[in-house]
Image (cartoon, helix red, strand yellow):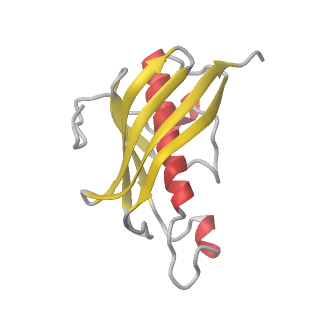
Amino acid sequence: MPTKIDPTFPTADLSMIKRMIPHRYPFLYIDRVNNLEKDKGGIGVKNVTCNEPFFQGHFPSQPIMPGVLVIEAMAQTAAVVVNHSLDMIDEKLGIYLLAVDNARFRKMVTPGDVLELHMSVLRGRGKLWKLDGKAMVEDKLVSEAVITAMWEKLEV
């Protein structure tokens, strides 16, 4: 999987993301997923702006995107990668975070940053998937974690 955004790979824009995962504003933390490659990975993009509701309390005089939300953005990118891999667009899904391992926070994410969420599939078997995540701003590592999650089709 390329480490830079490559326009020759499939992309999920915001409208496609909403068809793939159940998250909605104010809890949708990705704007696009580039470089989608089945069973391999993708790169999520979050344009961080001063209008984010969490900046009102974290912290008003020095706004910093909470690390837990960077991890959530990784998990949402992972969900799009898995749904793309499983061809589960427009399915009613339950997506459950099972584990976050080896989480590290290296630099702050602030308004004006373009957060890239590089997710690589480590293991994908049926309902259980494990992905390695690296959050980058301007080619600098700001956070990393290994995400494990479970997918199940919901009966409507």
Total marks in image: 0
Q: Furthest-front residue in view?
A: 102
Q: Position of residue 66 (x, y in %)?
A: 54, 64
Quadrant occupied by the N terminus? top left
Would residue 41 appear left or right of 150 to someone viewing this image?
A: left
Residue at image location 47% in from the left, 35% down from the top: 78
- State which quadrant residue 132 falls in: top left
Q: Nearer the viewer, residue 47 or 72?
A: 72
Residue 2 visible somewhere in the drawing = yes
From this view, report whether residue 9 is shown above or below residue 45.
above
Residue at image location 42% in from the left, 42% down from the top: 32
- State which quadrant residue 35 falls in: top left
Q: Position of residue 20 (x, y in %)?
A: 55, 29
Residue 30 visible somewhere in the drawing = no
Would residue 29 appear left or right of 6 to someone viewing this image?
A: right
From this view, report whether residue 66 is shown above or below residue 77.
below
Residue at image location 58% in from the left, 33% down from the top: 21
Q: Furthest-right residue in view?
A: 156
Q: Position of residue 148 (x, y in %)?
A: 52, 33
Q: Position of residue 112 (x, y in %)?
A: 39, 68
From this view, report whether residue 38 is shown above or below residue 149.
above
Quadrant occupied by the C terminus? top right
Residue at image location 44% in from the left, 70% down from the top: 111
